Each structure stands twice: as structure tokens, then as C-alpha cells.
Image (spheres, rainbow, N blue to C red):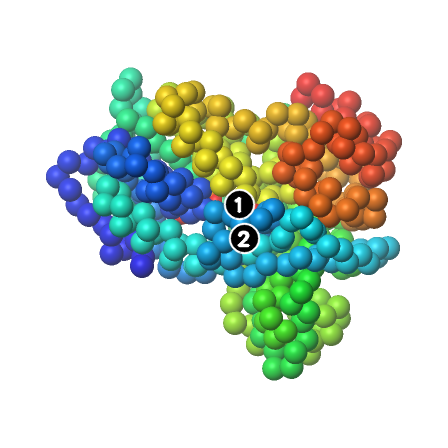
Amino acid sequence: MVLSCSIEMKSDMHFDYIILGSGAAGLSLAYRMASDSFFDDKTIAIIDQDAKDKNDRTWCYWEIGEGYFDKIVKKKWDEIQFYSKSLDKRQSVNPYQYKMISGIDFYNHTIPFIDKAGNFTFIRDRIISVNEAEDIVTVQTDSREFTAGLVLKSYPSSPKIDPGDHIYVDQHFKGYVIETEQPVFDPSCATFMDFRIEQKNDIRFLYVLPESETKALVEVALFSNSLLTQGDYNAILTDYIEEYLQISSYKIVEEEFGIIPMTTYDFSRHNTKRVFHIGTGGGIVKSSSGFAFKRIQQHSDQLIHCIKNDEELSKSYEGLHGRYVLYDKVMLHAMLENGVAGEDVFTSLFQKKSAPQIFKFLDHDTSFIEEIGIFRAPPMLPFTKSFFSVIGR
Ligand SMILES: Cc1cc2nc3c(=O)[nH]c(=O)nc-3n(C[C@H](O)[C@H](O)[C@H](O)COP(=O)(O)OP(=O)(O)OC[C@H]3O[C@@H](n4cnc5c(N)ncnc54)[C@H](O)[C@@H]3O)c2cc1C
């Protein structure tokens, strides 16, 4: 099921809601709307330039118990591994499980479900502009104009991020899904972070997500503002597979590449009465880690609640921001502007704290006392300096 078959040219191109972007955020929101009778009599359009018929990314996240998209979870792990030059730690993530979903499974699961609801119109086109008047928003695409009372926009409006005011770094990553003839992977454990590779003044790590003894996604992630050439990413991956995974014979069956912003920039400042930002465009990516999938689910639930109860949509950010924005700023500042090696920060965290404690912190579920414990794990002095540098910034 792809978007291309769902383009419908109605005479009336006005909708109650238009969702811009049918990626993780747009489809997660639409999926909830399609499941909720409140939206049965609403007209909803979803516009995306892409057919969403490729496996363009893999999402991992941790969760306690059964989750919203468990049906399409490809693999779950009860244990994760952390490596750096000074730490080799495998541990249980109980009560969490670390889960993996393939992009294509998500699109193939959500799009037909949404389409079946009958009140959604999928439009495959490039969005050029979004203009708001007093009581209507006009969305201009390459081929025509659409209007709506409320627009939910999931990709950034190219906000000019002034590095003087905001900490900004790209997380860029490239992955190979590889298959081997011999059983070489341990499918009971995912490598969450492996910092043993040369850091070259960046923050560089790999993760390995084994689906079976013969198939795994091996991905390198870098926090830096200079992208590498595809050849450089490939070299890191092939060296790692040979040197650290000790695999000499394998087949690359899929590749993925992506860039996501890690920034303390407040994307919500672009929200207006009738244009509200979701997903990456709404600043839902966690700035200190780049994780977003689970946060998108939480935000979608909260947004649906706000729409149904006629509440200010900004309330939907509750729990996603708050004091944790300050913690993210401190963490990013310490690593990017205060010279603390990312490898050292994550090594000390994983040395002193358990994976479930770290997950809980990243989920914004910790108490203040637990947070002090987390902040005492990495090198104290530079973190304290960063704290005072970012306060009020
Ligand atoms: C390769 C990759 C791996 C990731 N892995 C993880 C992970 O393991 N865990 C995690 O939590 N997060 C992960 N993320 C981060 C985050 O979860 C994803 O980026 C997620 O897809 C963000 O959802 P979104 O809806 O904001 O953006 P997207 O899913 O990128 O959707 C945006 C949509 O907008 C459309 N669009 C953009 N501009 C236009 C335009 N002008 N006209 C029409 N359509 C347009 C795009 O085609 C796209 O479909 C990953 C990101 C990438 C890129």
C-alpha cells in the first residue's frame, strides 16, 4: 500500500485538518485519529512528496510491557551491550525491552489502516508554502492549493538557527543490514553503543541490532557538524565489521542514511493559532540523544487529547520539555562546547548507572533525587561549568 494510489482529486479541497508529512509523526497522529470516533465526521488530508514505499529507516526505542505498535515490532531485546575503550558491560534492561521497528513495516501497517477509515485523503505532492489567514490556512503544493482550519506540520520550516543562541549539532548516521552464511550474531543482545572506534574529535559510535544469528543492522552515528562522504561512512562500517565483529564474509542487503538535528532551539516558537508543529519540526527529537520515535507517540497521544478537549495545543508538549530541556542543554554544552569527550560521558554513565536508570532519565520519568544521581556520574567539574554557561541562555 503506497500513497500514490490514494491521491484523490475532490472538487472541494478544504479539510478540517491537514497533516503535512506522512513520516513517523504524521502517520502516528493520523493513526490515532483514524482509531478515534471523535474524528469520524472530520475531513483530514495527509500531504507528502514521498511514496513511503521504501525501508528508509529503522526505529529503536525502549518500553515497559506491550506498546502501541507491538504488532509490527521486528525484534525485542532484554539485554544491551555498551562498549568503550575502558568499559565492556552487558546488562539486562528489565523492566524495559529494547524494541525495533522497520520503517517500511510502519508505513505498510499505518497507511492502509488510516485509508480504511474513509475520511482521510492522501495527497502525494511537494509542499511549497503554508500561509495562514485569520480563520484559514492555505497549503500550496506543486500542483494546487488546499485549505484547512488546522495544519499539523511535521518537518522543520528551515528555521534559521543562530549558533550563538542555541547549541546545534547534526546527528548523522549510516547503516548496513548485513547477512552472513555462518551464525555470528547473538540475537539475545543489542549493542546500544560502541565507542571503541577512533573518535577523530567527534562523538562517534556504532550500534549493532541483531535480528537473528545471521542478520543484523550495523550502524555508525556521529554527532558533528561536518558530514562525511559516503565513502568515509562505508569505510567506518566495513572496518568495524571486520575488526570488532570479526566478520570477513557478509552480504549487504539494505542501507540507510539519515541526518537529524540535535539542538536546544525552540521549534515551538513557529507554532501559530492554526499551524502547529509535530515530530522533528516540533522539536520532538530529544536534543541530547536524537531519540524521537517514542516521544512522537507520547506527543501524538497528548495532541489528540488537546484537540478533543479544545485545549491549547501547546499543552501537548507536557512531559516532553520542562526541566529536562535544561539537562539536555547542559549535556550538549559539556560535550560540544566544553570539550568533554562524548565517550567519557557515556562510559561514566553506563559504569555508574544501570540501563533502566538511564532509560528512565531519558524518558523524563525520574525524580529530582534520581536526576542528581545521574548528573554525578559524568565528570563533575565541566558539567558544573556547563550548567552555569547555559543557564538563562
Ligand atoms: C535513518 C534514521 C534512523 C532513525 N532511528 C531512530 C531510532 O532508532 N529511534 C528514534 O527514536 N529515532 C530515530 N530517528 C529519529 C526520528 O525518530 C525519525 O527521524 C522520525 O522519522 C521523525 O519523524 P518525523 O515525522 O518528524 O519526520 P519524518 O519521518 O522524516 O517525516 C517527515 C515527512 O515529511 C515529508 N516532507 C518533508 N518536506 C516535505 C515537503 N516540502 N513536501 C512534502 N513532504 C515533505 C517527508 O517526505 C517525510 O515523509 C531516526 C531518523 C533517521 C533519519
For label 1, the residue is 293
Going from N to C along the chain, the mark reached first, 1 or 2, is 2
Position of residue 236 relative to residue 42, above or below, is below
Mark 1 vs ligand 1: CB below 8 Å: yes
What residue appears at the point 27 percent right and 50 percent down from the top-left corner? 116
For label 2, the residue is 59
Q: Secondary structure at mark 1?
A: helix
Q: Nearer the viewer, residue 88 or 241?
A: 88
Q: Secondary structure at mark 2?
A: strand
Position of residue 207 relative to residue 360, above or below, is below
Say whether residue 5 is left or right of residue 316.
left
Quadrant for residue 104, please give it. Answer: bottom left
The quarter of the rendered structure image containing the C terminus is top right
Mark 2 vs ligand 1: CB below 8 Å: yes
Q: Position of residue 149 (x, y in %)?
A: 28, 26
What residue appears at the point 38 percent right and 33 percent down from the top-left corner? 152
Quadrant for residue 206, please give it. Answer: bottom right
Specify the amino acid type for callout 1: Phe
What residue appears at the point 48 percent right and 28 percent down from the top-left corner? 316
Q: Position of residue 318 (x, y in %)?
A: 54, 27
Position of residue 224 relative to residue 306, above or below, is below
Contact (Cβ within 8 Å) of mark 1 with mark 2: yes
Say whether residue 319 is left or right of residue 117.
right
Say whether residue 84 is left or right of residue 278.
right
Label 2 packing within 10 angstroms: few (<14), some (14-19), many (20+): some
Q: CA distance from mark 1 to mark 2?
A: 7 Å
The quarter of the rendered structure image containing the N terminus is bottom left
What residue appears at the point 76 percent right and 55 percent down from the top-left corner? 91
Say whether residue 231 is left or right of residue 119.
right
Specify the amino acid type for callout 2: Trp
